[in-house]
Image (spheres, coloured by chain):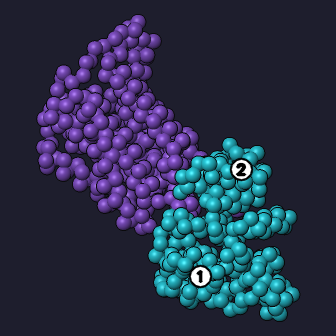
Chain colours: A cyan, B purple
Amino acid sequence: MSMLSVKDLHVHYGVIEALKGVSIDVNEGEIVSLIGANGAGKTTMLQAISGIVKKSSGDIEFLGQSIYKTNPKNIVAAGLTQVPEGRRIFTGLSVYENLMMGAFLRKDKKGIEEDLQKVYKQFPILEQRINQDASTLSGGEQQMLAMGRALMAKPKLMLLDEPSMGLAPILVKEIFSIIKEINAQGTTVLLVEQNAKMALSIAHRAYVLETGKIVLSGTGEELINSPEIQKAYLGG
Amino acid sequence: MIQFLQQMINGLSLGSIYALIALGYTMVYGIIKLINFAHGDVYMLGAFVAFYATTFFHLNFFVALVVAMVLCGVLGVVIERIAYKPLRHATRITALITAMGVSYVLEYTTQYFAGSEVKTFPTDLLDNTAFSFGGVRITMMQIYIFVITIVLMIILTYIVNKTKMGRAMRAVSVDEDAAKLMGINVDTTISFTFFLGSCLAGVAGVLVGVYYNSINPLMGMTPGLKAFIAAVFGGIGNIPGAMIGGLFIGIAETLVTAYGSSLYKDAIVYVILILVLILKPDGLLGKNVKEKV
């Protein structure tokens, strides 16, 4: 079943058309990667799905319901959360407070506590730094915090925008293996990445976005072996 | 020494009031990066609401205080919705000029309806016994000011640090879009911030009105500016900073009046502003956060 279905989505920034009719599908249980160069429209795509940027036309369905006109709050409430580009953690708030921001809309105290323990298990470093100001964390720790924060919303679908940005290769590997674990625990993932190799290696399916249009799609394996991708994105 | 202690008491009373006003400036700045120049006029309206509540409706001081607080809070929300919300993504100067416009609207609308003459509160409103501690005189009114200010600051600190709404306020002030991604309703959060800040300004207005027993529609201009300077002194956007800044400005002004000349009491505040801007533009507790990428 298609969990998220984006149909012919157009987004304009003033006169510039950032998305020129993009259609993608994300099925339940999948990791879907959206790769593309800088300025291809990847972040715009996620911001449009989350309801942060204004859409010009098209439709977005999540769990069979149109969320094209839904506000960001109700999109989160429906089970779709985003780990934004550049982590965007709340500096000045403690690690614990940041995590609790993720659970902002939830009222089930018991469930929140359980999920908090799960997040600590997934990211032991966060538990050690629970009372620290989030701005004191390293880049990798901040990425983990941003992911932990998103998990606290108990999402059905998690959007991840450039989780590898600015991280050392060893950390990139760790982050990607965590994404796989999160997926294995039942969260569907839509991943946006410039690091095409890593993104394709963990993806069930992938789309290639170029200047606002999907130019290629297939399974992760198909794309990794495709000559065009090799040439354009994998330096092969 | 006794005179010094006496002046400290007087300075603290005045400073508490500046601190209450400064908190509103700093919270609003923290969340939408706007210097709300109409804030001093909300303070003025607090005094007027209490004036009418006590003279026309013969309400007790504390009831009048609560009425003024709530009405000012609501007024703050209305101002934000009508004047600032449509400009939220406009340039900052546009919103700033609008704030000045709102300030004039409030001042002259009040003047139209209430008249420009100075009004005084009923004299029997509060028990104003003075106590003497080894020659240092402290009035009941000053005790009320301290207690009310301290209680409000504790409540505010609790709301901001311990409640969900307070956490949302801080999250929105750090990153509005990221806050939206958490499901926070940014508009409600901003309204709530204006409500809190304006409540405090309303209370400050009532306290000043009763303390100096003189109110007029333009009374908000100078204290508004001084409270703004107090907020800058403490580090704009920083809540403890506004409290410290308010007290500091109040004490500085009182000491200059007592030991120098009352001619310089306004000047000293602006001198402090200039020094802060030269020596520590972020203010006393202002933070210069560098983003990690």
Q: Where is residue A223 in the image (x, y as percent from the top left)?
A: 79, 87
Relative height, residue B142 to residue A63 (above, below): above
State which quadrant residue B139 falls in: top left
Q: Can residue A13 be seen in this view?
A: no
State which quadrant residue B229 falls in: top left
Instruction: Decide: few, some or many residues near mark 1? Use Cα within 10 Å; few <14, some 14-19, many ≥20.
Output: many
Please identify the residue farthest to the top as the structure is shown: B134
Q: Which residue is drawn at 29% across and 50% down?
A: B75
Relative height, residue B230 to residue B103 (above, below): above
Q: Which residue is drawn at 37% across and 33% down?
A: B17
Going by the numbered disc 2, the residue's amino acid type is Gln
Report the Cα–Cα distance between label 2 and label 1.
32 Å
Instruction: Decide: few, some or many residues near mark 2? Use Cα within 10 Å; few <14, some 14-19, many ≥20.
Output: some
- The disc placed on residue A117 is 2
Label 1 is found on which chain of the structure?
A
| Callouts 2 and 1 on one subunit | yes
Q: Mark 1 points at which residue?
A: A5
Relative height, residue B32 to residue B24 (above, below): below
State which quadrant residue B13 falls in: top left
Label 2 is found on which chain of the structure?
A
Q: Residue at x 63, y 68 (%)?
A: A156
Q: Are marks 2 and 1 in contact (CB under 8 Å)?
A: no
Q: Position of residue A116 (x, y in %)?
A: 68, 51
Q: Residue at x 43, y 41 (%)?
A: B23
In the displayed structure image, the side of residue B119 where residue A9 appears, left or right: right
- Nearest to the observer: residue B28 or residue A176: A176
- Helix, strand or loop for disc 2: helix
Going by the numbered disc 1, the residue's amino acid type is Ser
Pointer 2 or 1: first along the chain? 1
- Helix, strand or loop for disc 1: strand
Q: Position of residue A47 (x, y in %)?
A: 57, 73
